[in-house]
Amino acid sequence: MRLKYIYPLFAFLISMILITIFLIQEYIWIIIPSFIIFYPMPYLSGLKETAQNKSVVVKIKNKSPFMIPILFFSLPTIIINSIFLFTNVIALLLFFIVYFISLVFYFSGIYILIRDLKKQFEITIRPIEIDEKPEKKKLLLINPVNKDVAGLTINPSSTFPPLGLGIIAALTPNIFKIKLIDENFENFKYEDADLVGITAFTSVANRAYKIAAHYKNKNIPVIMGGIHASMVPEETLEYVDSVVIGEAESIWPTVIKDFLNNKLKKKYEGVHLDLENTVIPNRKIYSNKYLFGTLQTSRGCPMDCYFCSVSAFNGRKYRQRPYEEVLDELEQMPQRMIFFVDDNILGYGKSAEERTINLFKGMVERKLNKTWFCQASLNFGSNEEVIKWAAKAGCKMVFLGLESADPEELKVMDKRLNLQLDYERAFNKINKYKIAVLGAFIFGSDSETKESMYRKVKYILKNRIDVIQTTILTPLPGTRLFKELQQNERLINIDFPQDWKFYDMGHLTYNIKNMENEDFLKTHRKCSKKLYSKLTLYRKFFNTWIHCRNLQTAMWAYSSNKNYRNVSLSNT
């Protein structure tokens, strides 16, 4: 750490000693310990946390890394000195003057550090557009976002680069210049292009179709892929020229060849390839404002949960990349904070677990110095070797699809694995290695009642769920749930494609089985307000800090809870 960041600390300590000696000598035994002994700890901690979380501070202006240390110093200091000095108004006033001065010097040091971090950030900003040679054809890639619907995109800290578009960019030959319009950071503005590629989740399908219309009206070919287009290709073809169904790696070279020969087909269907020698995404197209880098190490899921479309898109066979290739890709990524986007990084069976352990060991051996979080099934908490190496490799949080703690509800959801494992034991093991548990819970299954909703809230508040994610069960196209509800005429938002905007995990889109819809929504609002109250979030922060014995993990958990609070309460 550079000495200039320490100068304000030295300056404060000297000025404080002089003030104490000349003005409040009789209370020196109280004030000296408060500021000489204890103040340097939060000061240095504030600098350290700010430097370690520079992306959080600079990119999304999150103040937590430097506010938490000074708050933990301030509260006991003010309380203790007020108790001992309350009989002497002058001494108490002088104490608060010293305390105010301490804040000035503290934030001066933080300001100097943040200023330097911002300069470093500005230097490292990469241009988003690639290869501007005018003779080349232009491929315009678009990542649409529906700003009218609340979701994780309302907070830049919870948005992630569109990995699929990075793969498309990497597969596209260099006779094209490529640009990404990413509505996570900029609103769409028409730009001329020779070919347009769009991806979209179901809840933003309408936005994607609206953007596509700008180019269709000018006879510029538009291709759409991603999960929504793959599940409802016939609908999508009403708004675009071509649809890429499924994974693009096996088919995109053919799409480009057909485009160049003016022979674009209506449909292209990818096949599931082995993941050895997987194409590494072209990350140069992404905005440098993203907080996390994203990386995928596996695809497919054999579980086939009735509300999930992963198996429909990526298949039921679990495919893994060789861990050495993943490590090579991680070494190329400039971001220190990583999100492994695998639906289950651990996989299924002993060989998959061994591969994951080797991946984590490799991250340690190569000294990659990444902090990251991932998604896994509950068996992540069963293998202590996995957890140990994940922690050593920099894991701070693991997303677990718990859905419910009620066995009957898990049976209805077809969550067979969760029925076999002990939740609390898994949480304790994960916390033991300073990793936070992000527990995902679903409201609205066919066994749901008002009493079961309140039991779910009680369970979440009582147990070691460090980060709370709650959603309303959403029948996404391509899932068994959607087909069942559609066949039984239980869907209530069926004016497609306009109503896709409600399929965002935050709206009720079907008739509840055991409750009146209005009663469910009213109860859900009460549950959300209790789960995401500020008091709950503060309690979760302290509990995570105690159980994990790590301030950084607690801060990760608290920031994530704030994001989910914003999402949940914006829908109530």
Image (cartoon, rainbow, N blue to C red):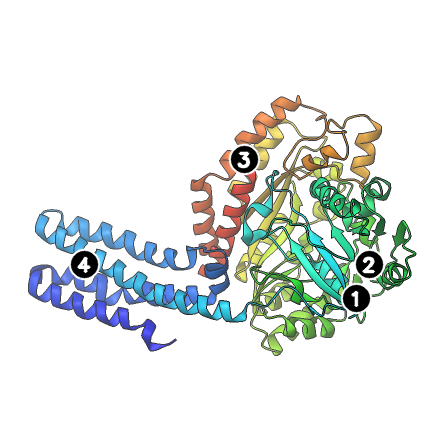
Give how far across and how far down residue 151 sits, in percent.
60, 43
Cα distance between the residues tagged 1 and 2:
9 Å
Q: Name the residue under label 2.
A: 248
Label 3 or label 2, whichever comes before in sequence order = 2
Q: Residue at x 90, y 60 (%)?
A: 258
Label 4 or label 3, whichever comes before in sequence order = 4
User: The disc labelled 1 sits on which kind of residue?
Assistant: Leu
Give how far across and how far down residue 242 sits, in percent.
85, 50
Q: Which mark is residue 22?
A: none
Q: Name the residue under label 3.
A: 528
Callout 2 environment at 10 Å: few (<14), some (14 to 19), or many (20+)? Answer: many
User: Could you tell me if the residues under marks 2 and 4 are in contact, i.e. CB atoms within 8 Å?
Assistant: no
Cα distance between the residues tagged 4 and 3:
42 Å
Q: Which type of secondary structure does the marked residue at label 3 adopt? A: helix
Of discs 1 and 3, which sits in the foreground? 1
Q: Nearer the viewer, residue 313 or 464?
A: 313
User: The disc labelled 2 sits on which kind of residue?
Assistant: Ala
Q: Name the residue under label 4.
A: 98
Label 4 or label 1, whichever comes before in sequence order = 4
Q: Which type of secondary structure does the marked residue at label 1 adopt? A: helix
Of discs 3 and 2, which sits in the foreground? 2
